[in-house]
Image (cartoon, rainbow, N blue to C red):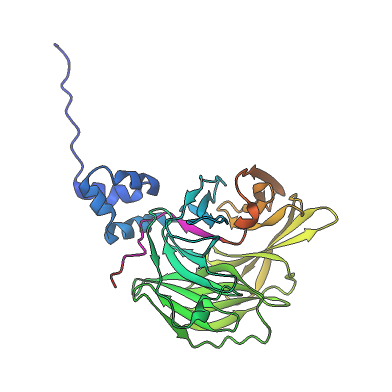
Amino acid sequence: MAGRKKITPAPELPPEILLFHILPRLPAKSLLRFKCVCTQWRSFLATPLFANIQLHHATAADRREKLVFCTIGSTSPCNFLTIDCEDGLVAQPRCCPFPGFAASTVTSSVNGLACMGIWKNAQEFSDLILWNPLTGEYKTLSRPVDRKCYSTSFTALGMYHTRTDDDYKILRINADSSVYLYSLKSDSWRKLESELDYHERIPYAGDHHDLLDESLHFLMKLKTRYLIIRLDLKTEKFTKIAVPSTCPYGCLRFVVGKGCIQLTIFKADLSSGTRTIEEWLMDGGGNWTKVVNSSCSIQDSSFQGPLYLMRNGNWLMCTNNGICKVDPAGNNAKGHHLSSTPPIIVTYQLGIYIETFVSPNQYVH
């Protein structure tokens, strides 16, 4: 046809641009589908090199975190659910790829890997499993010589990644103050010499832990007070940090945000049926400052507990009716009903993770 211009096809992108600069920036779930594009993509997406590049982008400042928890039932494997931390949306239940009757508990997570405790009985885990909820890969950890390490009673557990030796480590603190450390690189446990010595039994060691300045922090509840325990990852020494003196013996949430420790306290007002929210920040000298003091209209009888501190400062909370977003500054509670989710299970048997391609089987033993 006369006068029609010939269209010049666009030049193809160099493979290195596509593989190293474009694919790692795409949503993780899309990348799972892209494994079917060709053999080259499938092989490259399974390499530790790609996992590290994709992890770098996934842990950026605007990263999208999710909550994962397992439902309680009588079948094996059990089911798990995920909740988007920024919009409260719940994904459809899926089967865990590993066996586990009755219940599996999310004990900790880092870089897209979650540590799962498989219940043997009320006193002991039969196994600990390292699992990537996105890819489905998992690894059953080697069992420690000292079975007290797998105790389910009154323990704190933290998981972290060390950049110096590129290793994933899991820390367990038992009620008798014994401390154990697992290395994924060596697939082995060792007992740490610890100066932790409690003169009163620890009835609860919270699932709240976070990293700040190369130290792992735990919020722990003793019989009459709370305490923050800090482990220096370089020296493997513990120190204790006092919480605000006005802190009640009630419902707390502990997070590290914007380079500082933040403690959120939820107080019940039985006369009005509301919850008062206090937020405290701790500076480098260990001094606490109250930055928020407000109330929210969540009925006390339905309140189950705080789940996650969102990027905009709102709290994602769990009630008998589902998930609520609460704005502490604006005293505004907005409810999102989750018809298929038993909220009481969500509250403290969950982990926070990001979707990555990090493999729990990346080291050959």
Please tell me whether residue 21 belongs to the stretch shown in magenta. Answer: no
Q: Quadrant of the C terminus?
A: bottom left
Residue 24 visible, this orientation: yes
Q: Describe residue 41's horizontal placement relative to residue 29 as left or right.
A: left
Predominant SS of the magenta segment: loop
Please tell me whether residue 361 belongs to the stretch shown in magenta. Answer: yes
| Quadrant in the picture for residue 363 | bottom left
Q: Position of residue 168 (x, y in %)?
A: 39, 70
Q: Position of residue 254 (x, y in %)?
A: 61, 66
Query: Going 57% across and 53% down the picture, which residue do you hit?
Result: 310
Q: Describe residue 160's horizontal placement relative to residue 18 as left or right.
A: right
Query: Going 72% across and 49% down the picture, which residue do you hit?
Result: 331
Q: Position of residue 178 (x, y in %)?
A: 54, 84
Name the residue at the right extreme: 271
Whether residue 274 is situated above or below residue 142 in the rendered picture: above
Residue 235 visible, this orientation: no
Query: Going 63% across and 51% down the picture, which residue do you hit?
Result: 342
Q: Which residues are magenta?
A: 350-362
Q: Position of residue 55 (x, y in %)?
A: 37, 58
Q: How many marks?
A: 0
User: Of 168 and 237, which appears nearest the observer?
Assistant: 168
Name the residue at the top extreme: 2
Whether residue 91 is situated above or below residue 210 in the rendered picture: above
Q: Quadrant of the N terminus?
A: top left
User: Of 351 and 117, which appears nearest the observer?
Assistant: 117
User: Of 174 and 217, which appears nearest the observer?
Assistant: 174
